Image (spheres, rainbow, N blue to C red):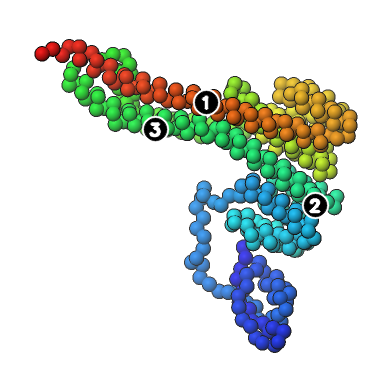
Amino acid sequence: MALTFEYKVRDRAGKVVEGQLEGDSLGLVVGKLREMGYLPIAVTPKSRVSVNREISIPGFTNRVKLQEIAVATRQLATMIDSGLSVVRSLSILSTQSENKELARVLSEVRLEVERGSSLSAACAKHPKVFSTLFITMVQAGEAGGHLDSVLLELATTMEKQAVLRRTVRSAMTYPAVVLSVMCVIFLALLIFIVPVFQKLFTQLNAKLPTPTLIVIGMSKIVLSVWAVLVVAVIAGGVYALRRYIRTEDGRRRWDAFKLRPPIFGPLLHKVALARLAHTLGSLIQAGVPILESLDIVSETVGNRIIGDAVLDAKNGVREGRALADVLHEHEDCIPMLVTQMVEVGEQTGALDAMLSKVGQFYDGEVETTVNNLTSMLEPMLTVVMGAGVGIMVVSMYLPMFTYIKHIPQS
């Protein structure tokens, strides 16, 4: 976190100048003043009461999005390619970043690089912001002397991952919103409307049809203490499920389940394959060894079943087998298209280019699937919501039709 220092200096004309300057340390501030052409006389930290601090609320911290990291990485690559030093580039990025958390992290990375650390080692101290993929590719770029081109490739990879996330999120958002609205409407009917009809039916003292009795029973449950118990049981079940998914066995079973549903299963499968192709292609292009690349991909692909297949491929490659041959043994999760393209890439020595084509293909497949899914779900969910509300309303009015028949005609 940058500190504020009060300084007293002499300019080139010998005039005393006073002011304030922000910096990470006293030495850096003194060096910056000398670069500005001043002769430091006194530089002291500004003493202040910490009243105007930011309030950090747990659960509402300023997170760094993948797209923001991708933009910063592309800007860093452009500045390095233009001849600026890594330290100077990081200083500019930390100043320009609108995300305060990202600005803080970039400032700390710059400070570590100034102290003699490599960029990859400095980024490795912030695992919540910079992934293993990011750190490994930066390390490969530093070792190969082409950091700017590696950063550009890394930015492109992260941008594609961000697009995939947004695409899947857009496919999931509409059904979630419609189902949430439907639940709110049902609860409002059960809490406010059904009890009014129940009092009316009690006064009439007549036999109620089965649908009406079911709806009234649901209303009684919602308004009773049992509702709290049901909510507690559901919340406990969700909490236990999330804890189980965090375990190795639970993660594997959950990822296997996600690939089975007829609608969202194929979509999530294509997303994982696109991520696999883009990530592995980028790592190979950056010069990362194939075994290390496969190890990273197995952790970043986003699905443990496909990750296990990649790990098995890593073991096979270590034994001297071709990557395509090992992937061919996992046809249940690795399609033939991927295997054939990998085989062509290995034979021609252009594996990274072939993987890039595979990633582009599955990017298009994901976009097409989402568009088809949205166009199919919109009318379906509209019909389901209308039918649900209609059934509940009709259930309440069924007894009214019976009573009207027994009203004497004048």
Q: Is residue 197 left or right of residue 238?
A: left
Label 1 sits on residue: 377
Looking at the image, residue 308 lies above or below residue 71: above
Q: Quadrant of the C terminus?
A: top left
Looking at the image, residue 161 lies above or below residue 265: below
- Residue 102 position within the rendered picture, expressed as x and y whole percent measured from the top left: 63, 54
For residue 277, the mark is none
Three-letter code, disc 2: Leu
Separation of residues labelled 2 and 1 (CA atoms): 45 Å
Looking at the image, residue 191 lies above or below residue 26: above
Three-letter code, disc 3: Val
- Give me the residue at 81% from left, 29% from top: 342
- Give me the residue at 52% from left, 26% from top: 377
Label 2 sits on residue: 147
- Residue 155 position within the rendered picture, expressed as x and y whole percent measured from the top left: 72, 46
| Sooner in the amino-acid sequence: mark 3 or mark 1 | 3
Label 3 sits on residue: 184
Looking at the image, residue 203 lies above or below residue 58: above
| Sooner in the amino-acid sequence: mark 2 or mark 3 | 2
How packed mark 2 is, by other alpha carbons closer than 10 Å (few <14, some 14-19, many 20 or more), is many
How packed mark 3 is, by other alpha carbons closer than 10 Å (few <14, some 14-19, many 20 or more), is few
